[in-house]
Image: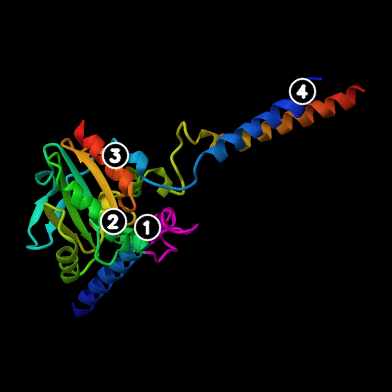
Amino acid sequence: MKKLYLIIILFSLSNQVVFADNLQQKEINILKNLRCLVCQGQSIADSNSDFAQTIKLVIRDLINQNKDDQEIYNFLNSKYGQWILYKPKFNLNNFLLWFFPYFILLIGVFLIFKVLKKRENS
Amino acid sequence: MKIKIITSFIIPAIVLLLFFFGLKNSNDYNTLNLAGNKIDNIELTGLENNNKIYIENLLSDKYTLINFWASWCMPCKIEHKFLLSLKKDKNLKILGINFKDKKINSINFLEELGNPYYFLAEDKSGKVSVKLGIYGIPESILVDKNFIIIKKFIGPINSSDYNDIIKIIKN
């Protein structure tokens, strides 16, 4: 009987450790996707600035309140705008950022195709 | 012929236009464009008595300037004289939120320079500042009676900001 209790206790402890690890990983992933607004090219995860320390505290609170990633990003977006997110949402202001490389690629392919066709004809 | 026109004129023109508009935009980030948003009804802790109070109970029926400050912040001393002048206007209430500061230092600061605030709250951890979209101090938010942000002031309030505030609250 004692052995059974011991197994149950060990099992629940290991579950708690895995759960804590998952939460920690979730927190790190979110912090890596947030820009430190007062630093030069650093994420919140990398920065030790006062602003980053405060954001880390707030993110931990939101995770403890069982907020999912999107809810946390939406909250920060409403307070600081899209700039705080390294992966901004697709919208009218940034559509060029998403599509311009593909546009240039298509033009390149088109030009190569035309040049090759012209050579073939001549 | 068509290819030559595209390669010689259209593509360089597109690239130049992109550079032109890209360089015209300032790369300095700020939250000034968040004017028009509504602030959340957050809970504040009084600096002097630690009483909990919701921000909606503190806002003026006309305009409120929410000012984040600290005794260790040198630019806060620079803007202080403007806050003292703004205090005299009946259309405005100034709500002070003391940011990551020691209570004794903040009280000494106000005793030395004067107290422009009708209510003083504390933000020991900085979490309140995030709820109001603050990323450095001093920073001030001018809100109307409906909690709508009219204007944000990043950095110390100067004479130009002072005139702006007076102009807004007189209208």
How crowded pointer 3 is (Cα within 10 Å; few <14, some 14-19, many 20+) is rated as few
- Which numbered disc, 1 or 3, marks the residue closer to the eye? 3
Q: Secondary structure at mark 2?
A: helix
Tell whether B87 sits left or right of A20: left
Q: Nearer the viewer, residue A26 or A4?
A: A26
Q: Is residue B11 above or below residue B52?
A: above
Query: What residue did someone put label 4 on?
Result: B5
**Residue B87, x across and y down, in percent:** 16, 48
Residue at image location 43% in from the left, 47% down from the top: B29
Q: Is residue A118 magenta?
A: no
Q: Quadrant of the N terminus of chain A?
A: bottom left
Hey, what amino acid is under mark 1?
Answer: Lys
Q: Nearer the viewer, residue A46 or B96?
A: B96
What chain is tagged by disc 2?
A
Query: What residue did someone put label 3 on?
Result: B164
Q: Secondary structure at mark 1?
A: helix
- Which numbered disc, 2 or 4, marks the residue closer to the eye? 4
- Which numbered disc, 4 or 1, marks the residue closer to the eye? 4
What chain is tagged by disc 3?
B
**Sooner in the amino-acid sequence: mark 4 or mark 3:** 4
Tell whether A15 sits left or right of B53: right
**Mark number, residue A63:** 2
**Dots 4 and 1: beta carbons under 8 Å?**
no
Hey, what amino acid is under mark 3?
Answer: Asp
Asked whether residue A75 is in view, the answer is no
State the CA–CA distance, disc 4 to disc 1: 52 Å
**Mark number, residue A26:** 1
**Mark number, residue B23:** none
How crowded pointer 1 is (Cα within 10 Å; few <14, some 14-19, many 20+) is rated as some
